[in-house]
């Protein structure tokens, strides 16, 4: 164990002797890992938004053959009939107004809900600033998601205007579900009138079922009930609904995998080049170490340790900067009224640092082999 510590200490000393080159290499690795972390975070956020699990119990009832919220119009009285279907726990009618139906980084989403049903349908929502009572009293009050408020610089008591709708922030809310943190909840009648949708008309219904096993059965029952009506429905699990409506967004994020791969290759090339320059500039020193009795394995491990240190330092800096940036900016990508929060998590951070360490080791294999192949006598004469 002490031998390993001594090798790492010696590797650090060697890198410290060339500070400018080491700092430039670390900065380059950090840039590559920053890009990789951002891409990986987007991939993970997309997986959370689209992959169903045993805990999912929410269905979305939308107008058949409609996608953008502005084109989906359903009678509000459908809610009473949906509640009568076996397996349904709760139904909430929702009017949605968005500033852009296409894929966008700056999505403003208003959700109009009946005032008395919000906490009943989503008890996990927590008011962290302001007052829910104020929202209940005001017709134009809004409960704004924490990420939405941070992105727009809003606090309780502020007024803001978007999509031709002016509201006052009654409270800031936080929820374990990213969708709730990126929208503004207002009262249903207010949004129906402000958006000129008309009273008695909503965009969709969110339906909670008793068990996740009931999702498909209840969805089929809802669509069968309204299949012959003038406004037929298309009912899907919430995450499947997001995956269906956000195809353009999914394709865009899927392309970013190539950017992540490019970042990984760039990091490997950068570390390999830096370590190879170190080895070539230290030919005589390595020959002296071998003459003093250092085994070839120790020389190889010394080179590998230098690559690992460069990868670890650069990776840690890049991953931490990427995580901090994404946490600060609260980036949200939306499409057709559905939003996806790009939020870093501990798994992405840990995997990014570990990958950088592995890349540093792998990139150092060839330079380490070069260090071993140099004859001692020739190296001493160089």
Image (cartoon, rainbow, N blue to C red):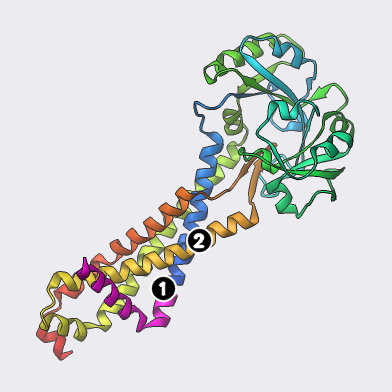
Q: Is residue 210 magenta?
A: no
Tell me which residue sits at (78%, 24%) in the image. Answer: 73
Q: Residues within 10 Å of mark 2 (few under 14, many from 20)?
A: some
Establish if 118 lies above or below 109. Answer: above
- Residue underneath mark 1: 25
Q: Quadrant of residue 363?
A: bottom left
Q: Is residue 188 left or right of residue 54?
A: right
Q: Secondary structure at mark 2?
A: helix
Magenta portion: prevailing SS class: helix
Q: Which mark is residue 320?
A: 2
| Closer mark to the observer between disc 1 and disc 2 | 2
Q: Quadrant of residue 282?
A: bottom left
Q: Residues within 10 Å of mark 1 (few under 14, many from 20)?
A: many
Q: Which mark is first along the chain, 2 or 1?
A: 1
Whether residue 256 is visible to the viewer of this picture, yes or no, is no
Q: Where does the image place residue 218, in percent across and percent down from the top left?
A: 60, 14
Which residue is nearer to you in this view: 40 or 138? 138
Q: Is residue 42 left or right of residue 312?
A: right
Establish if 327 lies above or below 231. Answer: below
The span picked out in magenta is 1-25
Tell me which residue sits at (77%, 43%) in the image. Answer: 99
Q: Quadrant of the N terminus?
A: bottom left
Tell me which residue sits at (64%, 22%) in the image. Answer: 208
């Amino acid at each position: 164990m002490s031998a390993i510590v001594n090798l790492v200490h010696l590797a650090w000393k060697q890198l410290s002797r060339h500070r400018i080159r080491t700092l430039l290499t670390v900065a380059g690795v950090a840039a590559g890992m920053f890009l990789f972390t951002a891409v990986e975070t987007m991939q993970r956020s997309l997986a959370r938004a689209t992959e169903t699990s045993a805990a999912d119990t929410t269905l979305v009832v939308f107008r058949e053959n409609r996608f953008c919220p502005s084109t989906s119009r359903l009678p509000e009285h459908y809610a009473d009939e949906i509640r009568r279907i076996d397996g349904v726990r709760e139904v909430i009618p929702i009017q949605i107004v968005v500033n852009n139906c296409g894929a966008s980084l700056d999505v403003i989403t208003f959700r109009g809900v009946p005032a008395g049903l919000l906490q009943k349908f989503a008890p996990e929502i927590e008011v962290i600033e302001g007052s829910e009572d104020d929202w209940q009293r005001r017709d134009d009050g809004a409960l704004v998601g924490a990420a939405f408020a941070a992105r727009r610089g809003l606090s309780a008591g502020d007024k803001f205007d978007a999509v031709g709708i002016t509201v006052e922030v009654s409270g800031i809310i936080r929820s374990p579900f990213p969708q709730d943190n990126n929208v503004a909840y207002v009262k249903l009648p207010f949004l129906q009138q402000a958006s000129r949708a008309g009273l008695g008309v909503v965009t969709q219904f969110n339906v909670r079922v008793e068990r996740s096993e009931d999702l498909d059965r209840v969805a089929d029952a809802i669509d069968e009930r309204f299949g012959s009506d003038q406004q037929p429905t298309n009912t899907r699990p919430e995450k499947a609904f997001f995956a269906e409506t956000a195809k353009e967004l999914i394709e865009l994020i899927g392309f970013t995998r190539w950017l992540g791969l490019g970042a990984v290759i760039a990091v490997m090339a950068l570390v390999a080049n830096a370590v190879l320059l170190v080895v070539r500039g230290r030919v005589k020193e390595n020959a002296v170490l071998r003459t003093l009795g250092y085994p070839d394995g120790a020389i190889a491990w010394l080179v590998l340790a230098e690559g690992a240190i460069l990868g670890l330092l650069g990776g840690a800096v890049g991953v931490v900067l990427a995580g901090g940036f994404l946490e600060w900016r609260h980036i949200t990508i939306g499409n057709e009224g559905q939003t996806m929060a790009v939020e870093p998590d501990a798994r992405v951070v840990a995997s990014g640092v570990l990958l950088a360490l592995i890349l540093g080791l792998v990139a150092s294999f060839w330079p380490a082999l070069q260090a071993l192949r140099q004859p001692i006598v020739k190296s001493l004469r160089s």
